[in-house]
Structure formats: structure tokens, C-alpha cells
Image: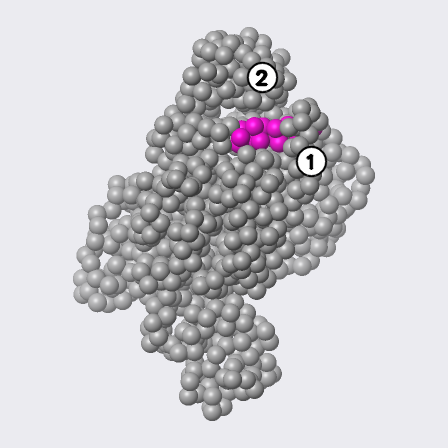
Amino acid sequence: MSTAGAPGRRPLAATYRLQLRAEFTFDDAAAVVPHVAALGATHLYLSPILQAAPGSAHGYDVVDHSRLSADLGGREGFMRLVAAARAAGLGIVVDVVPNHVAIPTPAWRNPVLWKVLREGPAVPEAGWFDVDWSAEDRAILMPILGEPIGRCLREGTIALDRSGDEPLVRYFDHVLPVRPGTDHLPLPELLDRQWYRLAHWKVADEELNYRRFFDVDTLAGIRMERPEVFEATHRVLLDLHAEGAIDGFRIDHPDGLADPRGYLRRLREATGGAWVVVEKILEGDERLPADWDCDGTTGYDALNRVMAVLVDVAGAEPLTAVWTGLAGGPRTFHEVAEEAKREVLAGPLRAEVNRLVALVAAICQDDIMLRDHTRRAIEEALVELLVAFPVYRAYVVPGEAPSAEAAGWVEGAAAAARERLPERAEEVDLLADLALGRRGRGPMRDEFCVRFQQTCGPVMAKGVEDTAFYRYFRLAALNEVGGEPGVLGIPADALHAWAEARQSTHPRGMTSLTTHDTKRSEDVRARLVALAEIGEEWAAEARALHEATAPLRTAEGRPHPADELLLWQTLVGAWPIDAERLVPYLQKAVREGKLRSSWTSPDEAYEAALQAVAEGVLADEALRRRVAALVERLAPATRANVLSQKLLQMVLPGVADVYQGTELVTLSLVDPDNRRPVDYDERRARLARLDGGGAPADLDDEKLLVTSRALRLRREHPGWFAGPEAGYAALPAGSVHAVGVLRAGRVAAVATRLPIGLERAGGWGSATVALPEGRWRDALGERTLDGGLLPVAEVLGRLPVALLVREGG
């Protein structure tokens, strides 16, 4: 049972996310508290607060769990923030990073890691890290060198520094300890005797011997399943919770843990049942494991369904035609994703494949019945199984029978792998059985069962989210975390069915529309999904833009038409945008896509060609007018989509989150664009004017009105929205263009969907909505309505959305 509603703790109804960094500290957050309280949120929701690596822009690269971030203001600054929040009636939720720690530069900033690098596997702290100490030289690979080590030694860029209290190995900004008793040796021999192995950065993909966060070498996985690691890494946060300074926790990347279920149980026990949500990406109809002791997810499942209900399925044919015509298809997103997974397994995740193959090979060598499975056969089968795996993880605990859902994921992937690689069917069967714990117990078998699950997530994240999403641009708005770009739109009934299930299983989970990780902000997506309603018109416009920019393309540099299509959608979605934001975004996109450039092998000529087209469009007044005209054409639909998705998020079951600044229209792209400073003065002034009786002057005001009035309603009546007693029902509406929701029998919300189609149909006409009997107050205006069968046009009034509250008991 959650303690979020316990005496002294404000009931959790809505959060406001703040991204902390050296430029936005605890004291800066405290200055924002009055605005957040006035807006109507019940809790601040903070990015990680423990000490992170120098210059961290996000806080997920923790280096010291024993203290709050000095860069943010330390414990004193945090307690000032707590005092300000409490004075304003706000609680605090914090982001927790249990999966990994940073390998900083210099390494001494992580004291636990420093000790292990200095003293090796015998020290207790070595148990923190998921290191394969059986590697030939029993050394942690440190792939930090810009060149092969032999060249570095010849050029003298690696040096031994004896000037301080202890000898150090230096390589430019990198500083590493020296194993006791080895500082008298010549440098090459000294390096050979350390508990770490200095290596060229390219070695990591093939020979890295520690678990990391996805493919990030500087984020080392830790063994949170060990009680002493949990205690050491959570003590500061647990103490703050016990003191009443922290009310709840958002858990980053639980799929990376060896035992997510055990971790959540331990956290609940240690906090007496605090509110906990997990950053779990659910694919399709996947459900959160029923035995996870948490309140739900961080809301990507809500985000994608709210967006999808606003997408016109009729746009599939023209959008597909322009995509395949320009990109050289036809190709489905499934094909793109499979190819991308295969590439990351052969490239940045090669070390993870090697470690799994070595483990299975050892299992086979140890069992005469399995000994004839060769390493090559094992590897080929493993790659196919990982490529076919459709979700981030199956939850199997060694020694326990797998759930039917987990067995279904593994067996389904195995069937696909056998079909693609029939000559390796026996190896596929072996791997599937090991993954499900069906080949007996033993240290190596148990390790494979766990490590296979820990590898599935990185394959999905790097293959799909960070690669395929940057290759497939049929409708870029759908390329969102946890999204399905191959599925264009859902009916309102599907949203209601999901919401009813959410209310039944996780009524206190989080809902979100924008996060620090989303590829595009909610408002960029709101504009882009309108393209599905003008599919033919958009197809013609995209082709016309391609032709109009021909003078900007040269024989030496021709951007691929697929990247051009991303450029057009980015311009439309984020307009107005300048080159300072657009060019870095496009560079990141093509590098993430890894087809025509990449982070490890950038093609500067190709990137320059794409930049030339982007800058040329921005410099050409005729082209600017063309883009602006299309944005203006979409403005009415954009307005309806912006307000509808915000209202729907606010009334869905769970705790609603507002990402910093998005109470106004925010046209941001993927990080770091979505972490730009927020103009809170403007937001305060706008809110004060609305609260003073002023009418909304523009879409920013309208979004602020919807957000603030819904948040305040949540704060005043949390039980109507976030809890098992809230209830959820679809509000019958006699039009495919209306989505109606009823909460607790007391709150009715009506939102517009497919507004361009509505306009083509001539408006609402005789469409009605069935409002329960009673007197209903308009929370967005100054009017009341009597319940009954009412015209939708009357219910909506001057806005494309309505939020109504039934008066009386």
C-alpha cells in the first residue's frame, strides 16, 4: 500500500518535472515553486539529485551515492528547496538511477570505482560491478584511448605521474590509480600489471568485459541485486524519505537490473510503501508484470495512445506512398527495425553477444549432451533470437516457472528465429530453454537466464529507439519512445479499453506527454499528426519541396530523400525554428540512423550537404513562406490536437505529469533541445492574467487554461483521478470526432479528434454527447449545463475541448 496519502504527505495527483543541472540548481528550482503551486501540481518531480559526473547535463551519470550533488547546491540547497515546496503545499518525487554508475574523467570522482581499479577484485567494492573477472588478464577494460595503446606509448601520451601523494597514470584528462607495488616498473610493464586494461575506444564493442548501460562505455552496470549495494546506493535517498523530504520515486531503466521484481520489493519495504513508478517501455499490448510492487509506469504507454487516437488511419495510403516514393521502398517499419537490430548486434553491442556466446559455450562444454554445439552455431542462433525478440525483456527468475507471458515472448521469438535459420533450430531451442530456465539449474545456466534478459533491452533500445526511429519517417510523430511507427492511429474505443485496464491494475501510475527522453515534444507531435488528415496534400507538398530545393543540392553532396523528408517534417513540426537548433538536430538524427553517417564514423561531407539544404531553406524567403503557409493551413487542427491530447492526459487514470514549460505550447525536439531554459516569467504573467479573469489570447493561453484548471481539479479532488475508487467510463458521444471520458461520476471531459475531417463533414451537425443527469459547471469558462443528451457543439462552446464538473453531492 502506497504511503503517498499518509498523514503529513500530500496525496499525489499531478507532478511537474524539473531538469536540474549546474545552470538550474536546487535554489533555481525553489524559485519556480510558487508558479508550480499556482499551476496546480501537487508534487515537484526532480531529475536525479545525487552527485553526478562533472558537467553532467542530466544527472543520470551518478559518481557518488553518498552525497547530494554539490553542483546543484548540496544537502543545504536541497533542504532549502524542500522547505520552499512544503511551504507551498508541494511534495517531492525524485528520479533514481539503480542500474549504473558513471566512469568519470578523472576516475577518482567515483570513489568506489577508484578503489576497485586500484586494488582489484579482492576488495568488497568489486562486488558492486558486473565484471567478467575471468577475462584472460583479469582486468577491467578501459577503452579511453584515442589511438591504439602501442602508438600512445610511442608518442608518450600515457605517462606515470609520481608528483603527488600516490602515483597516477595520466592520459590527457584521464587519471587512473596505480596498483600498489607496481610503480617501480617501466611504464609498459606497469600498465600490464594493473587491474584495468587501457585500450583504444574501438576495442570496447568487441572486448568490453563489464555490463554497461546500453552501449555507453562510461556508464557501468552495478549489481543492485546485492543487499549491500542497494543499501550503499540508496541510503541518502531513504534517509531523506524517512525525514519527509522525499515522497516518491521514479525508477530509471529497471529492465537493466538482474532482479527488477526483487529491487522493487526491497524499495517498497525500505520506504514503508512509498509511491514508485518505473520507466518501463511496454510494447503493443504488453502488460507491466503483475508481481512488480510499484504503482505503474512513467507514462509512455499513455503518451502513445493519446497521440494515436488523434491520428487519421485514412492517411496511411498517401503517407506510405510519399515515404516509399522518396525513400526508395516499399519497406515496413518491422523490416527496418529488424535490420537495425542486426546491425547493432554486429557493432556496438558485439561485446554483449560475445559474452553470452562464451557463457553458452562453457555450458555446452560442461555437459557432454550439449558439447557438439559450436560457438559459431550458438552465435548465429543467439543473434536471430535477439533480433526476433519483440519486447524489452521477458521476466524470468531462475528457479521459478516462467509466466505464460514470458514463455510466450521467448517461444514466439524462437519460432521466428527457427524459421529464418532452420539449420540452427537445435541451438535456437537450447537458447530458448536456457532463457526460460528449462535446462536445469547451475551458476552458468542461471547467469545466462539473467544476462539474456539484460541484453534484450539494449537491443531494443539501440536497434529500434536509437536507430530504426531515425530511419523510418512515414509520420515522424509516431517515432516515439514505446511507440509503433508501423501502426497509424487507433479508434477511441481502443483508448478507452486501455484506460479501463489501467484503472483496474495501476490506477496510480503516471501519465505523460513530454519527457526528457521524448524524440519530439507533445506540441510538435500534435502538429505533425495533422498531416495524416491531409495525406494527399502533404504528399504533393513534400514532392514540391523536394523539387524546389533542387538548386541547393550539388553533385558532390545530395542528401538522401529520406533525410529530406525528415527535414520537411521537422520544419513543419517545430516551425519557426532557426539553424542553430535545426542543424544540430539533423546531424544527430543522421548519426543515430547510422546509414549515411554515425557517431563513430561521421561523414562530414554528407552532413554538410544536408546542412546546406536546411540552411538554404531557412535563407530562402519563398521556401520559408511555403513552410509557414503549410503550418498556417494546419493551425486549426494543431489547436484542437494540442488541447485535446493535454485534456485527455489530464483525465486518464493515474498521476499526470507536466514536463517543464509545456504548460505553454513548446515546440522542442530531442535532447538537448528539450532541455533549453524555460521562461517562467512569461508563464507566471500569463497565468496571473487568466486567473484575473482575462480571456485566452492565443493557443499558449488556451493550453495554459486547460492545464491549470485540470491540475487544480486534480489537486482539489485527487481521488477522482488517481486511485482505485476513481472509476473510469467512456462518455457516449455520437461522432467519431469526439472522445468523451467520465471520471468518478463527477468529471466529464470531451475532446475533439480528427478536426480536419470534422471540418470537411460540415461541423458537429446533430452529434450529441450523453452527459449524466445533474448540473455541470464548465471548468474552462463561466457557464453551467444541465445533464442529458446534449449537442456536442453546445458542450464544447468556444474551445475544441470541454472539462465539466458536476455540482452538488
Which residue is nearer to you in this view: 21 or 712? 712
Quadrant assignment for the C terminus? top left
Residue behind mark 1 = 685
Say whether residue 638 is magenta: no
Q: Position of residue 164 (x, y in %)?
A: 54, 84
Position of 427 relative to 738 (above/below): below
- Residue depicted at x 33% and y 76%: 122
Identified by mark 1, the residue type is: Ala
Read off the magenta span.
698-712
The disc placed on residue 796 is 2
- For disc 2, the neighbor class at 10 Å (few under 14, some 14 to 19, many from 20) is some
- By secondary structure, the bulk of the magenta-drawn segment is best described as helix
Q: Quadrant of residue 644?
A: top right
Label 1 – label 2 distance at C-alpha: 27 Å
Identified by mark 2, the residue type is: Leu
Say if mark 1 contacts mark 2, CB within 8 Å.
Answer: no
Q: Quadrant of residue 755?
A: top right
Specify whether 582 is left or right of 424.
right
Judged from the image, the secondary structure of the residue bearing numbered disc 2 is helix
Q: Position of residue 787 (x, y in %)?
A: 48, 10
Mark 1 or 2, which is nearer the eye?
1
